[in-house]
Image (cartoon, coloured by chain):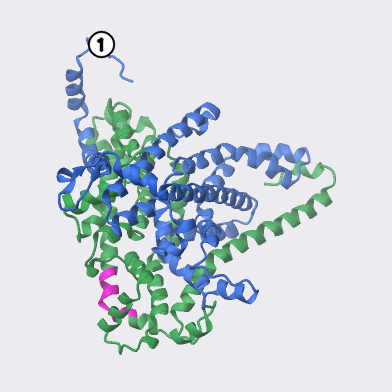
Chain colours: A blue, B green
Amino acid sequence: MPQSNTAVPKPIPKQRFLREMKQNGFLYLLTLPGILFFFVFSYVPMGGLVIAFQDYSMRYGIFGSRFNGVDNFKFLFQTGDIWRVTGNTLFLNILFILFTTLMSVFLAVLFSEVRSRGFKRITQSISILPNFVSWTVIALFLDAFIDPTTGMLAKWLARMGYPVDFYANAAVWPTLLVFLRIWQGAGYGAIVYIATIVGIDPQIYEAADIDGATRLQKIFRITIPILKPTIILMTLFGVGRIFYGDFGMIYALVGDNSLLFKTTDVIDTYVYRMMRMLRNYGMSAATGMFQSVLGFLFIMVVNWLARKLEPDSALF
Amino acid sequence: MVCPLSELTQNPQRRRRGDAVLDTAVHTLILVFCVLCLIPFIVAVSASFSSERTLLREGYSLLPVAFTTAAYDMLFSTRQIVDSYKVSLFVTVFGTVLSMVVTAMMAYPLSVKKLRYRGAISFFAYFTMLFNGGLVPTYMLISKYLGMRDTLWCMIIPVLVNPWNLFLLRNFFSAIPGELHESARIDGANDVRILWQIILPVSLPALATVSLFYAVAYWNQWFNAMLYIEDASKFPLQYLIMKMLRNIELLKQMSSQAGFAVDMSALPTTTTKMATAMVTIGPIIIAYPFAQKYFTSGLIVGSVKG
């Protein structure tokens, strides 16, 4: 917060601003392109949220379209679509957060128990690799496993007597998406936990050795408790974005296959379809606004709670 | 690692056996996970070298069935893949450079403690991570009001600065000891020289890390292409794959472009898709062993907290 300089009489704000510009003008100049970027591509679209209250037409644009009050929102809640997609978004995100965190911590503990540096380096590199593959490529990979006639997994399941038509059976997709999420992100997610484990004072383990602790005991009584603040922080990062579906993932994998919408359609894919397929810009913007406002309120509450319960884990 | 004192504790034999069991379990589990990580890559490579007919009849497998390079021959005889490769390369190289310049320019002042308004500017950027206008206003802005439709710019400018990367880099800069600035200032260096001759050189690993994050993001990007690009000669690779996933039409067009006899049953659609995937992840796989250490170190040093 601004502290008044004792050497000179307290200047009025305008003078203070000018003096600061004169002293550090170069540094402020450096920030200008970035500020301009955020202004144009983040703040201007916030103003564009008025589309949510318009019967927007591409021809008349944002300044010429007719305002229709809260009709878009009314309609949105009437159809009931919004509850389905919000439910899916929350459900999938909870599954993702839960299972990727579990798996990442598990992997991190496994890696920390490996003594051979070569083995550790190579296997860790392999486990991170899927993180750098785009979801479009993963969707192609997935085809090789779940295609009804040629896919390896689909064929194997059929042989076992459990034929599953993955591209028509919405019920299996939450599980499938969780597996893909773990495949893609668990190794990468483990990095931050591995870093925390590396930072643990070795004397703690030595003391446990003297007391005759087994390695399993050391894992459960030392390593995991020390990881707790990191786990909470990473979970909060995820929870803070719980209203945002992973469009890149879901749309690349599911696309416009309406047979799977029941379990996979999230707010973001719904907003996209509403805009591109139905060209209902007002409704789409209203849905987006619903998401942004809810997401914002939610992250504020989460952060407030975190600061109360575990101040080290607060996001900001 | 092993403390000599620990051998004094009771029952060393039983503990060593327990250790051996744990070691075996740990190594096995890690190996299983790594094999699962690699299998999809192996299956895709094999499929891309398989004959279409045999693959459709016998299904995917770990090894190529009836080895052939037909899919790659077909792929590289089209203009599309070359065009898309050029687009992806341009967007990645040019985008990364531009993003780095703007991000570093903004991140450095935000790390300078004497700057009066740095808190306000940080908040200006941080707030965009908490709240946004959503898809429709952004879409209207870019396509209707900025006229970026069907230009390569629409894949770079709207994603120029990633706030996450901005704060990552700012945290790196903040971690540079203040004495370094001070001694330079006492020697009479101004802000320009401090940044250019002191801060940037000592931050090279950090700059490399953030560049890699940007480069991967640009290379893997397809969303903006899907929204704003209709001209096929401007499709980046990832969007080409997206198109292939969704419609077989594109593959037909490509093969007619390549002058293949259009015998639908012989058209290597599945294997060509896999070949395209291979060509697309090629640069990542090649750069990976060199770049990997930056990805790991980058995440560790700059945990983002506003």
Which residue range is magenta in the image?
B75-84
Q: Residues within 10 Å of mark 1 (few under 14, many from 20)?
A: few
Q: Is residue A122 left or right of residue B95?
A: right
Q: Position of residue B281 (x, y in %)?
A: 40, 67
Q: Position of residue A19 (x, y in %)?
A: 18, 22
Q: Position of residue A66 (x, y in %)?
A: 18, 44
Dominant secondary structure, magenta: helix
In front: A231, or A246?
Answer: A246
| The quarter of the displayed image where residue A204 is located | top right
Q: How many numbered tags mark residues here?
A: 1
Horizontal side of B293 relative to B115 (left or right) equals right
Could you tell me which secondary element the residue under label 1 belongs to? loop
**Residue shown at 44% from the left, 50% from the top:** A85
- In-image side of A98 versus B280 (left or right): right
Residue at x-position 26% and y-position 45%:
B102
The chain ID associated with circle 1 is: A
Drawn side of residue B230 relative to residue A98, left or right: left
Is residue A202 positioned above or below A134 on the image?
A: above
* B291 or A295, nearer to the observer: A295
Depth order, front residue of A275/B70: A275
Instruction: Specify the quadrant that holds the C terminus of chain B.
Output: top left
| Residue on which disc 1 sits | A7
**Towards the viewer: A132 or A4:** A132
Q: Is residue B80 magenta?
A: yes
Q: What's the residue type where badge 1 is placed? A: Ala
